[in-house]
Image (cartoon, grey):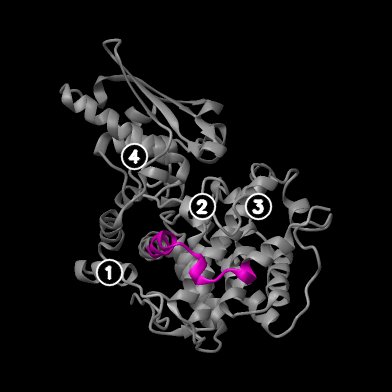
């Protein structure tokens, strides 16, 4: 039996702030800022789901322990984590990681923030917990891919519970056994199906929400001495056996403790499934080329999109979305809207299907190309070719979309993202203030929640 749980617990138990590089600390601050931007977007876009979930939680009541975004009321810590995680994933604007094929900040941050509000901890403690949460998620989920996805599971929920449990246990300063029991209890409760990318996409936030709730509860139970099963990850009745047919040891352990996967994660620029982003970047460039020659979409005969198979499986089945949820999972719609408008924004999730959109969609052909994905090299891209009516063509290849790797966003980009996400909810001054609060977090200061009301 491969020893998986103990090395990961050992990493979480031993990691201290002085072992986290300053560059990683600064990057974590950017991801915290992005979490708030994504939350404002999700609060606006996924209103029907948010309303139902919030009403159910309010009816249950409970101790006033932790803050919830967009509310002046406090909730039990596990429920606050649940609600805030739901908001953060509502517009699919939250961060992600190519190796793990899932989202991280949407569950790790609300879980950690909910507990931090109750405890006497510093921002430094919070940042260490977040870094650990990202590593647990990206390493565990990444080691289980692509089998995890192929079996129909959503890594954001399935691995998210363990990541949140590890992060929360670290924040509570639990000992080795406490961290072990916390992640074991979370592994037992792991859940989340990827069927939510086929229909009722508005329900997708339930997976990170449950992950955050499970993480908080698991850590609190471990704090009280609850003993959980041994070998929760590696047992023949454990997590990996349940969710995948192959475990990539290299993803699990290479650089553990010295290479932090939050540095390898990405911040999203568009309010849609990550699989659409390369296509959006490519068609934006093609549109610019058309404009230079005085041409428009009307001068295009066909649009050939070579893209990796998983992208088509997740976002290549809906040509004409009827809701914001479906729009986020449509490569066709994203390309058409971008070609017509020059960008893809939150406004485009207010679905319209005019004659021009139909004309463009019918020109698009998706073609499977395995060469467009190489996880080890950080590649998940596409090659888009616009064939013109005159027989000429314009081609753009995007292997790494904006927001990833060397093409990552900066603080100015994050401020612009917040302004876009918060338009109609927060003033320009309020939006900029949130970004500045995140940017100037002092690791030595006591944690105080950053509130949006």
Residue at horizontal 45 percent and vertical 55 percent from the top: 95
Q: Residue 274's spot in the image, x, y percent?
A: 46, 45
Q: Residues within 10 Å of mark 3 (few under 14, many from 20)?
A: some
Foreground mark, 2 or 3, reads: 3
Q: Residue 237's spot in the image, x, y percent?
A: 83, 57
Question: In whole angstroms, how far apart are the C-alphas of marks 1 and 3?
Answer: 35 Å
Q: Residue 342's spot in the image, x, y percent?
A: 25, 38
Q: Residues within 10 Å of mark 2 (few under 14, many from 20)?
A: many
Q: Residue 85's spot in the image, x, y percent?
A: 49, 67
Name the N-terminal-most of marks 1 and 4: 4
Residue at horizontal 26 percent and vertical 10 percent from the top: 390
Question: In whole angstroms, how far apart are the C-alphas of marks 1 and 4?
Answer: 39 Å
Residue at horizontal 75 percent and vertical 81 percent from the top: 226
Query: In this view of the protein, can residue 453 be seen by the observer?
Result: yes
Q: Is mark 1 on a helix, strand or loop?
A: helix
Name the N-terminal-most of marks 1 and 3: 3
- The reply to whether dot 1 and dot 4 touch (C-beta < 8 Å) is no
Tag shown at residue 253: 3
Foreground mark, 1 or 4, reads: 1
Disc 4: which residue: 353
- The reply to whether dot 2 and dot 4 touch (C-beta < 8 Å) is no
Question: Does residue 365 lie above or below 240 as drawn?
Answer: above
Q: What stretch is highlighted in magenta?
A: 12-29
């Amino acid at each position: 039996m491969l020893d998986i749980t103990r090395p990961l617990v050992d990493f979480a138990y031993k990691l201290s702030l002085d072992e986290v590089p300053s560059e990683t600390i600064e990057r974590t601050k950017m991801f915290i800022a992005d979490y708030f931007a994504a939350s404002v977007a999700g609060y606006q876009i996924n209103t029907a789901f948010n309303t139902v979930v919030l009403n159910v939680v309010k009816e249950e009541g409970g101790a006033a322990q932790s803050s919830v975004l967009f509310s002046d009321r406090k909730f039990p810590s596990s429920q606050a984590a649940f609600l805030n995680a739901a908001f953060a994933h509502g517009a699919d604007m939250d961060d992600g990681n190519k190796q793990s094929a899932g989202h991280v900040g949407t569950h790790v941050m609300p879980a950690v923030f909910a507990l931090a509000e109750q405890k006497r901890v510093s921002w430094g403690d919070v940042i260490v917990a977040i870094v650990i949460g990202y590593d647990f998620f990206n390493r565990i989920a990444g080691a289980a891919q692509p089998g995890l996805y192929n079996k129909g599971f959503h890594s954001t929920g399935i691995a998210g519970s363990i990541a949140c449990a590890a992060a929360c246990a670290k924040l509570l300063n639990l000992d080795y056994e406490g961290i072990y029991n916390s992640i074991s209890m979370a592994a037992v409760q792991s859940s989340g199906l990827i069927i939510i990318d086929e229909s009722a996409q508005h329900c997708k936030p339930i997976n990170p929400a449950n992950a955050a709730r499970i993480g908080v509860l698991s850590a609190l139970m471990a704090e009280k001495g609850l003993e959980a099963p041994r070998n929760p990850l590696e047992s023949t009745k454990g997590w990996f056996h349940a969710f995948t047919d192959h475990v990539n040891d290299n993803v699990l352990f290479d650089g553990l403790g010295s290479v932090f996967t939050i540095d390898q994660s990405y911040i999203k620029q568009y309010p849609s499934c990550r699989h659409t982003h390369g296509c959006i970047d490519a068609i934006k460039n093609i549109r610019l080329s058309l404009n230079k020659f005085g041409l428009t979409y009307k001068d295009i005969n066909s649009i050939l999109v070579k893209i990796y198979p998983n992208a088509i499986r997740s976002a290549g089945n809906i040509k004409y979305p009827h809701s914001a949820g479906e729009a986020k999972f449509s490569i066709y719609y994203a390309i058409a809207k971008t070609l017509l408008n020059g960008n893809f924004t939150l406004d485009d999730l207010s679905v319209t299907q005019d004659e021009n959109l139909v004309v463009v969609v019918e020109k698009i052909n998706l073609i499977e190309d395995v060469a467009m994905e190489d996880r080890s090299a950080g590649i998940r891209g596409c090659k888009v070719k616009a064939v013109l009516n005159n027989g000429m063509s314009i081609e753009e290849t995007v292997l790494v979309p904006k927001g990833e790797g060397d093409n990552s966003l900066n603080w100015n980009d994050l401020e612009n993202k917040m302004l876009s996400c918060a338009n109609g909810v927060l003033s320009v001054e309020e939006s900029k203030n949130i970004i500045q609060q995140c940017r100037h977090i002092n690791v030595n200061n006591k944690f105080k929640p950053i509130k949006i009301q």
